[in-house]
């Protein structure tokens, strides 16, 4: 077999069927990025970047982790080194990342947005740095242009319920900006009652909602007011960080006692914390169902493992890893509790530990609604799974037990405007998987159907799932 060129048109496409699927159905397909961490303010301001380091390395804990693994000092990662020194440290790391998706993403982003096909390494670093920086001076290399060039139609940001959504409103009223940027309701502050910030967050909630939050009823009414507010401003989804999916059924009277105990400064037991979180998450689920929102559950992250670095840099700085979610029973009880009240919203289940793939693919089939194909979704390979093997495994497991054709596909889960290359990465993997099944005689050679299937998974299914009411 002839050796192929890195990032050529056959990249990740190992058969002629896969290549035809990609060329006929994927190239030019819009992007529906339903979960990310972009800042709407940067889009509204169309923030110019002085250099590639600012747009590429700022806030990217994926890159930070690998630089630390390579022995790069923190000064060149989150410290006070200048931007060229930080870029140079990343260029030194890159050649050692062969086999890691970051190696592919880095070069795909350089090619997709800057037209640079040279491989990044210490020898090419200065040339690539200067070339990118020169382009970044031009208007077509600002956030809005990156979004337009990638053909992004929808962006779901991640937003605290106490947010004013000022920049979402400004963007929504800007007729010159075509993409939809919708807020996503992320109520971590409401659910993590054990955190020392809880009482302070309640005060912020009271301030923005105009409703007193010193009682459970007031607190729930304030949350409802914020759900209404997000809905009025284009919100169509929620997102939840569920480190362990535990569920304890409790009466409202029991939760009142737990809530009052916490706001008075008393310590809670683990069972009280779980019971409270179970109750509030269920109440939120009912609010989402009423609005016909999508509820996203990101389960299984073990966060902030390095105490010293958390104290030095704060949370979400690259020291999280895969946890043991043990989610089967708790997830079943939670979904069933909502379903018993006819209040189960469309729900996307994400797991961080691939051992839980079977749990989620099996769970999907337990709950359904007539007229909604794939009401419960198994989310794309997330975080530590968004590589070739992880994405293939997620789709194979979904196909083995469920229906791949109704899958809502990829998301960036990123803070970078250059991350849209990840959608192309995913779509190539999808085309290759289907092409491989055709080549092996495991699927019929019906290109019209397969091409429509790829278009649906790449864009159409997500648009219908999140937007249709």
Image (cartoon, rainbow, N blue to C red):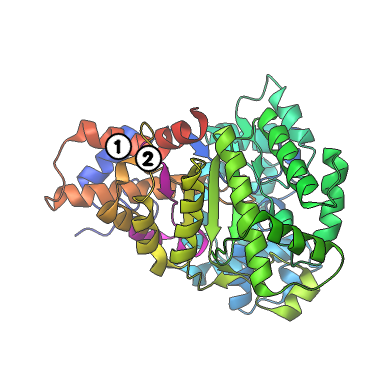
Say whether residue 187 is magenta. Answer: no
Q: Nearer the viewer, residue 361 or 426?
A: 361
Q: Position of residue 296 (x, y in %)?
A: 54, 49
Nearest the eye: 214 or 349: 214
The answer to whether residue 9 is left or right of residue 239 is left
Q: Residues within 10 Å of mark 2 (few under 14, many from 20)?
A: many
Q: Element under label 1?
A: helix
Side of 394 relative to 202 (left or right)? left
Q: Is residue 175 visible?
A: yes
SS at badge 2: helix
Relative height, residue 465 to residue 84 (above, below): above
Residue 127 in sight here = no
Task: State which region is magenta.
Answer: 373-393
Q: Is residue 461 left or right of residue 76?
A: left
Q: Is residue 390 magenta?
A: yes
Q: Which mark is residue 453?
A: 1
Q: Quadrant of residue 34?
A: top right
**Residue 64, located in which quarter of the rendered image?**
bottom right
Residue position for label 2: 457
Q: Quadrant of the N terminus?
A: bottom left
Residue 233, position in %: x, y? Answer: 69, 30
Q: Are marks 1 and 2 in contact (CB under 8 Å)?
A: yes
Residue in front for this viewpoint, 203 or 317: 203
């Amino acid at each position: 077999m002839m050796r192929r060129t890195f990032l050529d048109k056959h990249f990740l496409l190992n058969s002629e069927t896969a290549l035809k699927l990609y060329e006929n159905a994927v190239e030019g397909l819009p992007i529906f990025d339903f979960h990310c961490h972009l800042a709407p303010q940067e889009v509204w301001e169309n923030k110019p970047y002085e250099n590639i380091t600012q747009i590429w390395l700022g806030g990217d804990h994926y890159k930070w982790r690998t630089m630390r693994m390579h022995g790069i000092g923190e000064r060149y990662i989150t410290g006070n080194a200048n931007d060229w020194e930080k870029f140079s440290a990343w260029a030194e790391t890159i050649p050692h990342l062969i086999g890691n998706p970051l190696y592919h993403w880095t070069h795909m982003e350089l090619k997709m947005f800057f037209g640079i096909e040279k491989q990044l390494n210490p020898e090419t670093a200065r040339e690539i740095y200067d070339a990118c920086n020169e382009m970044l001076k031009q208007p077509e290399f600002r956030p809005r242009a990156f979004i337009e060039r990638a053909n992004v139609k929808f962006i779901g940001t991640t937003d605290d319920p106490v947010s004013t959504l000022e920049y979402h409103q400004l963007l929504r009223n800007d007729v010159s900006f075509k993409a939809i940027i919708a807020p996503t309701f992320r109520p971590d502050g409401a659910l993590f009652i054990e955190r020392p910030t809880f009482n302070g967050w309640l005060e912020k909630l009271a301030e923005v909602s105009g409703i007193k939050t010193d009682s459970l009823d007031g607190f729930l009414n304030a949350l409802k007011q914020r759900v209404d507010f997000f809905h009025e401003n284009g919100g169509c989804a929620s997102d939840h960080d569920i480190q362990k999916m535990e569920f304890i059924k409790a009466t409202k009277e029991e939760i009142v006692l737990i809530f009052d105990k916490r706001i008075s400064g008393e310590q809670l037991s683990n069972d009280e914390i779980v019971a409270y979180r179970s109750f509030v998450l269920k109440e939120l689920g009912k609010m989402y169902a009423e609005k016909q929102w999508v509820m996203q559950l990101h389960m299984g992250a073990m966060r902030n493992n390095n105490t010293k670095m958390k104290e030095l840099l704060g949370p979400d700085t690259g020291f999280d890893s895969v946890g043991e979610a043990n989610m089967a029973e708790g997830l079943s009880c939670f979904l069933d509790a909502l379903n018993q009240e006819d209040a189960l919203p469309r729900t996307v289940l994400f797991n961080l530990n691939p051992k839980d793939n079977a749990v989620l693919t099996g769970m999907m089939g337990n709950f359904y609604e007539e007229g909604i194909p794939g009401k419960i979704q198994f989310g794309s390979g997330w975080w530590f799974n968004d590589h070739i093997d992880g994405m293939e495994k997620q789709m194979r497991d979904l196909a083995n037990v469920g229906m791949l054709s109704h899958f809502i596909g990829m998301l960036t889960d990123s803070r970078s405007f250059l991350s849209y290359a990840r959608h192309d990465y995913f779509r190539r993997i999808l085309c290759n998987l289907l092409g491989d099944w055709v080549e092996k005689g495991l699927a019929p050679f019906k290109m019209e159907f397969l091409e429509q299937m790829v278009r649906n998974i790449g864009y159409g299914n997500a648009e219908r799932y999140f937007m249709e009411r």
